[in-house]
Image: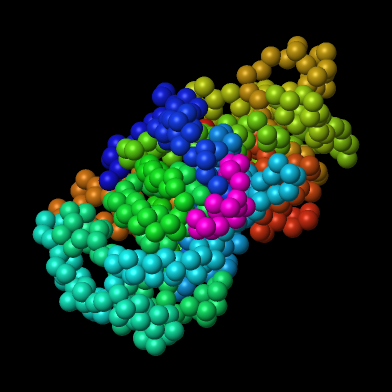
Amino acid sequence: MPSQTPHNFADSLPLAGSNFIRNLIEADLATGKYAERRWSGRPGPADQQLIGGVDPARIRTRFPPEPNGYLHFGHAKSICLNFGLAQDYGGRCHLRFDDTNPEKEEQEYVDSIIDSVRWLGFSWEAENAGGGGEDHLYFASDYFEWMVRFAEYLISSGHAYVDSQSAEEMRARRGTLTEPGSDSPFRGRSVAENLDLFRRMQNGEFPDGAHVLRAKIDMAAANINLRDPAIYRIRHASHHNTGDRWCVYPMYTYAHPIEDALENITHSICTLEFADQRPFYDWLLERLAEGGLLQRPLPQQIEFSRLNLTYIVLSKRKLIQLVEERHVDGWDDPRLPTLVGARRRGYPAAGFRLFAERVGVSRSDSLIEYSLLEDCMRETLNECAERRIAILDPLKLVIDNYPAGESEDCLAPNHPLKPELGKRALPFGRELWIEREDFMKQPSKGYHRLYPGNAVRLRYGYVVKCTGFERDASGAISAVHAEYFPDSKSGTPGADAHKVKGNLHWLSVAGACRAEVRLYDRLFAVPSPGAHRSGDPVGSERDFRDDLNPASRRVITAWLEPALRQVDAEQSFQFERHGYFVADRVDSRPGAPVFNRTVTLRDSWSAKPTP
């Protein structure tokens, strides 16, 4: 379990390359452990690989998602790790779909995963020395013929048998963590009978659940995963890739190590929950290598801690609940910790790469502050996002001594740190929009914005002095009046003669455009959704959905500067003073953008007390 105290990595960021996985890889490269491996140019068993040349990849890693859902933030860490290691050490990273469960897998998920990995900036295609290319996009289902062949070898060599017990009977004989299991009554079947039954299973002669193929290891093993685990089950189901070709499908724990070996994977990197499966991973590959079916050296499994972040849930079950119960608006809702949601929210791919580098990898579980992820997004966006002005809560400002019907341009930099990006024109006129909070009829202490008698600078424009205000029928402030100083325009010689403390953002009423703006915040209101809190009844379980943040989404109509009228979907900007925003990739239309708030300019959550 992750620790309950969030860890803030800001003061102890790991140096690039300073993690145990890199140390293992560098040690393997130094000893030449994988230097003599052969590669035929495509995945395959030993007899195919051994006729190929020396593998041009110094290492091979893989990102192996199951195509039964959408990728989340934890997958982003794994993608960056596996593809990054391959890049850094002259290797190759494969994108492989572990599509061994036909009842839960769909092409929709395959397409989404491919799109997300590309979006993060990684490729599974590699140039060869001869100028050609290798496309390392693979499907476990393409290896089913080999997997069946290997299963029959295990039967023939006495390492597997067909069990005809029910699932309940198998469970009863499995034993516990402190008590050994007991042998199946079918464990002593002959090789001939087992082969016959397994081939009849392949031919579709039996219903689902009638038989399973099990590895024959040790029912008294201390590791419960070595107590004759199931490796094949009957499933009369159509597969997204192989159609109705198969009536039997391999179990994930059987298929995964074989896939690694067929693809010449050197370092099979996975999260800590698979550590207990490593003995079976090694046992299976050793048995197949003994039979000459796989080339040595075999892949090695390496485990690291999974990503745990405050204020989110990454459980697939919980994410499905949020979507199906309509707590969010689908899998790409910008509040959801899916990669499609993050992309729609405007989180830059480079921000995820920076985040993965900063959190590093270790073998110890820890809970990472969500603010670290947001800081990586801010840092990335600060470098690349051009600046624009948006008025989110508009109040009209009338400059009474400015000529009616006239207009002029004020110039604002597109990016204050990148003068090479030039400037843009902001039309200035008699009537402007300002933020409602920038006016007070009776100012509080330290308030330096507009109030009767006070002067402020309109950013990039003139200095104005408040002369009064209007109320509507309800008594609310409906307009503010001011006079401007003609010699105070920013960038002119007279501007420095006017010393004021306040500096306000504004837009011309005539030139501004209206747009829908969605103000997104954290989906949950507490760091650990569903965790027991002070005041909860003793022994009670808290529903994580009770911790949803009711203010996680607010939709407003805002006024934007003219340059934002024609923008492309997924363009990101800093709305000065308000944060970073992106043109929604789904709902934006030419001339009618919809903007999502990606992240505020600064963290507003760290100081919040935990309920």
Q: Residue at x 52, y 22 (%)?
A: 446
* 216 w.r.t. 5: above or below: below
In this rendered view, identify the residue nearer to me: 135 or 40. Answer: 40
Quadrant the C terminus occupies? top left
Q: Is residue 520 at all visible to an observer of this figure?
A: no
In this rendered view, identify the residue nearer to me: 574 or 403. Answer: 574
Q: From which residue to which does the magenta span run? A: 40-57
Is 280 left or right of 595, judged from the image as shown?
left
Q: Residue at x 21, y 73 (%)?
A: 187
- Farthest residue, direction bottom: 205
Residue 302: which quarter of the image? top left
Is 474 left or right of 456, judged from the image as shown?
left
How many marks can you see? 0
Residue 315: which quarter of the image? bottom left
* In magenta stretch: residue 45: yes
* 505 w.r.t. 151: above or below: above
Percent of width and height locating residue 135: 65, 53
* In magenta stretch: residue 43: yes
* 460 w.r.t. 278: above or below: above
- Farthest residue, direction left: 179
* 272 w.r.t. 356: above or below: below
In this rendered view, identify the residue nearer to me: 305 or 314. Answer: 305
- Farthest residue, direction right: 406
Q: Is residue 195 at all visible to an observer of this figure?
A: yes
Percent of width and height locating residue 64: 49, 54
Name the magenta segment's main secondary structure: loop
Q: Residue at x 42, y 62 (%)?
A: 255
In this rendered view, identify the residue nearer to me: 492 or 52. Answer: 52
Q: How is the image coloured?
A: rainbow
Percent of width and height locating residue 130: 74, 44
Q: Residue at x 52, y 40 (%)?
A: 36
Percent of width and height locating residue 509: 77, 43
